[in-house]
Image (cartoon, helix red, strand yellow):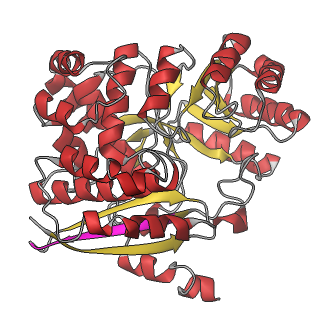
Amino acid sequence: MRITSLDVHDVRFPTSRRLDGSDAMNPDPDYSAAYAVLHADTGAEGHGFCFTIGRGTEVCTAAIEAYAPLVVGRELDPADLGEFARRLTHDSHTRWLGPEKGVVHMAAAALINAAFDLAGRVAGKPVWRLLADLPPEQVVDLVDWRYLTDALRPAEALDLLRAARDGRAEREAALLATGYPGYATTPGWLGYTDDKLVRLSREAVADGFTQIKLKVGSDLDDDVRRMRLAREAVGPDIRIAIDANQRWDVEQAITWVNALKPYDPWWIEEPTSPDDVLGHAAVRAGVRPVRVATGEHVANRVIFKQLLQADAIDFLQLDACRVSGVTENVAILLLAAKYGVPVCPHAGGVGLCEVVQHLSMFDYLAVSGSTQDRVIEYVDHLHEHFTDPVRVRDGHYLAPDAPGMSAEIKAESRAEYAYPDGPVWRS
C-alpha cells in the first residue's frame, strides 16, 4: 500500500496544574505528544507519537514533518517494516542532526510506531500478537544490526527466538488469563503531599500492585521522611523503587541512596546522566544490594549495548517512543535477553502505558519467555483520551485485543487539547 498523506498534531495536557508527573528534575510537566497519523491509499490509518512534557513539542512536530518526503507517496510493505525504519534512520540529512538520538530519533519513533499501528490494523491483530506471530527470521530482519554485532550477532538472536518457542502456548494462555505484571508510580510524584502519598500507596496495594515507586532527589531529609511514610503504609513485603530522574553526580548518588537503605529501596532509577555508562557502573557497585535501573532517556541501542557490556544496570527501562520505535526496541529486547537483564519499561507519560505494553508482551511470548522481576510502569493519568485505553486488573496489564498499537488519541481530545489553539489552551 502507499502512504498518501501525513497529519501531525501538537497535543498538550496541562498536568502541571495538579503536579501530576512532578519529579526532582521536572517539577511542572505538561504531558504532551507530537502526534502523527499516516493515511494509506487503502483507507487505513496508523497512529503514533513521541512523548514530551510541554515546551519543545513544536520542535518534535517539525522533525516529524521533516521526514514527510521519505514517507508520503512511498510504498509501505507491512511485511518489511524494518526497511521502512531504516529508510528513516539511515537518511543522511536528518541523521546528521542526531545521529540516531534526540529530537530526530523521537520523530522517527512516532512514524515507525504509526507504521506498526497501521500494520496491526491491516492484519487485524494487536501489535504484541503481530510481533509474536512473526517467524524468528522476520523478527531479526526488523533490527538495524549496525554497531551491535560485537555484542549480539543475528545468528545468536535467531537462537534466542527459536528457543523461546518452547512453552509459548502456555505463556500466551497465562497472559490472556492474568495479564502482565505492573507497578504503580502514581503514589510517588514529588509534588504530592505526605497525606496523598500515603493514601495512594495504600490504594495501589489494595489494587493488587506489589511494587510502587517514589520520586527522590530534591531534598534528602524530605526523601527519608517520605520513604519512611511509604514503607509504613505498605509494609515490608511491597517493593518500593526510587527514581532520581538524573538529578545527581555519581558520588552524590551513592551517598543519597545509602542514606535511604534502612527503608529497603528495590532499585534506584536514573541516578545520574543517562549517557554516563561508567557512572552507572560505579553507582551500582556503591549502592548494593540496591539495584540500578535506567533507560527512559537512553538515546539508542548503542548506549543500551554499552550499559549491558559494562554490567552497569540490573534493570533495563526501554521507552517505546524515545529510541526509534518498535524496531529499535526489538533490538534492545534481544540484547537484554542475551545479557540476562530484566526489562521493566518506562511508561510515565501520556500514552506510554498504552504502547509499551505491546513490547513487554511480545518479549514475554517470543524473546525472554519470562515475567520474573519484570514489571511495566503504570500511571493512572489520561487514559480516557485513548480509543483503546490500557486495562489493569489486580496489578496486571490485560492484553489488548483491538488491532494496532493502542496509540490512537480520540479525535475530540486531539481537538480540545491542541496547542496553542485548542479550547483548553485558549482558555
Regarding residue 400, the answer to whether it shows in the image is: no
**Left or right, residue 281 beside residue 327:** right
Number of numbered callouts drawn? 0
Q: Quadrant of the C terminus?
A: bottom right
155 sits to left or right of 244: left
In this view, the residue farthest toward the right is 221
Closest to the observer, 276 or 237? 276
Residue 35 magenta-drawn?
A: yes
- Location of the N terminus by quadrant is bottom left
Q: Main secondary structure of the magenta part?
A: strand
Residue 184 spot, x, y in % from top left = 56, 41
Q: Quadrant of residue 411?
A: bottom left
Which residues fall within the magenta stretch?
33-41
What residue appears at the point 48 percent right and 19 percent down from the top-left corner?
308
- Within the magenta stretch, is there residue 185? no
Viewer-proximal residue, 77 or 411? 77
Q: Tell me residue 303's x, y (percent).
A: 50, 30
Q: Identify whether 193 is placed above or below 329.
A: below
Q: Quadrant for residue 152, please give it.
A: top left
Taking 228 as reference, is 380 above or below it? below
Where does the image place residue 77, in percent across and percent down from the top left?
Answer: 11, 54
Residue 80 screen position, x and y as percent: 13, 46
The answer to whether any part of residue 259 appears in the image is yes
363, above or below 196, in the image: above
Q: Which residue is depicted at the point 69% across and 38% down?
A: 246
